[in-house]
Amino acid sequence: MTIELYNFPASTCSLKVRITLCEKALNWIDHKLSPGGTDHLTPEYLKLNPNGVVPTLIHDGYPVADSSVIIEYLDEVFPEKKLTPNDTKERARMRWWLRYFEEKPTGAVRYPTFQKVLIKNFNSMTEAEFREAANMRPLKTNFYKSMGRDGFSDAEIKNAINDIRQTVERINTEISDGGGPWILGQFYSLADICVGPLIDRMEDLGYGYLWTDDLPEMTEWFKNLKARIAYEKAYYHGSRYSEIFPELDLRG
C-alpha cells in the first residue's frame, strides 16, 4: 500500500487531510508544493487534479481530489479507527456539517487570507500579468479577478467575517446543546477535522476574538482539538502565516 499526498504546508485543506492521516496512524509520501510557485498548475499535476488546487491524495496510484472527499475516502478505506458515526442519523448530521463548512467558512476564510497575506504576491504585477495569473487557475479565476491587485472591498471582508462568526456561533450552540466536547457530542468526527484548520487560520490572522470573547464552548472545543496528538503531528511547525511572514501585521 502506498499513500502520497500533494499539499501545501500552510493550506487549511491540506492540514485537514494530514490530520485525518495522523488520526488513522497512516504513513504517506509527502509532496510539499510551493504555494508561491506554480507546481500545482503544471500539466503533470493537472492530470491528477484538473482543478489545479491542493491537496491531492494518491492511493496505490489512484488519485483522489478535494479535501472533504479525501477525508471521507480515507475513513471508508481505512476503517480501523472510525471518524464517521455508525448511526445513520448521526452520520447524516455529520455530513450536514461537512456541507455547511464547505459552503460557508471554507470560502469565507479565503478573503482575509488573501487580503492580509497572499495579495502581496500580486501587488507588483502589471494588469496583464495579473490576468494571466488569474486565468491559469482553473477553479479560482473569478475569485482572483474579484480580488484584483488592490484587494477586496470592506463590504466583502465584512461578509466573510460574518460567515465565520455564524460558524463559530453554531459550533458553540451545538456543543452546548449536545454536551460536547465535540460537534457530535462524545464522538470525535470528520466534522471537527474539517473545520479545525479554518479556525486555526482565523486565529493566525488575528480573529480569535470572534469566539474567545463570548463563546466558551467554542473556545474549549478549539483548545481540545489542538491538544490532540494527531493535530500536533499534522501541523507543520513554522507554516502559519504569522510565522512565515513575521514582518506582516496580521493582527491589526
Image: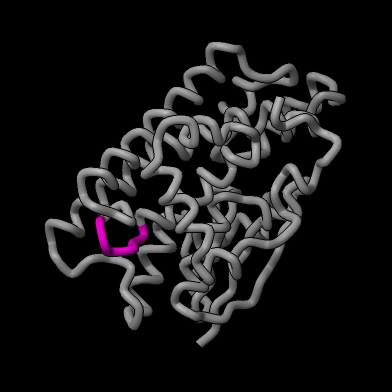
From the viewer's perspective, is 33 left or right of 47?
right
Does 231 lie within the magenta span? Answer: no
Res. 167 image quadrant: top left
Q: Residue at x 33, y 68 (%)?
A: 83
Say above or below: 157 vs 63: above
Instruction: Please provide percent x and percent y for residue 173.
Output: 28, 38
From the viewer's perspective, is 157 left or right of 68?
right
Say above or below: 188 vs 244: below
Q: Residue at x 84, y 21 (%)?
A: 126
Say above or below: 136 vs 91: above
From the viewer's perspective, is 36 left or right of 139?
right
The dominant secondary structure in magenta is loop
From the viewer's perspective, is 66 left or right of 117?
left
Res. 105 image quadrant: top left
Q: Out of 124 and 82, give the one closest to the viewer.
A: 82
Q: Quadrant of the C terminus?
A: top right
Instruction: Please provide percent x and percent y for residue 37.
Output: 78, 48
Q: Out of 144 and 225, give the one closest to the viewer.
A: 225
Q: Residue at x 60, y 20 (%)?
A: 146
Q: Out of 210 and 213, give the one closest to the viewer.
A: 213
Instruction: Please provide percent x and percent y for residue 17.
Output: 50, 62
Q: Residue at x 79, y 19 (%)?
A: 127
In the rendered structure, which segment of residues is drawn in magenta? Answer: 185-190
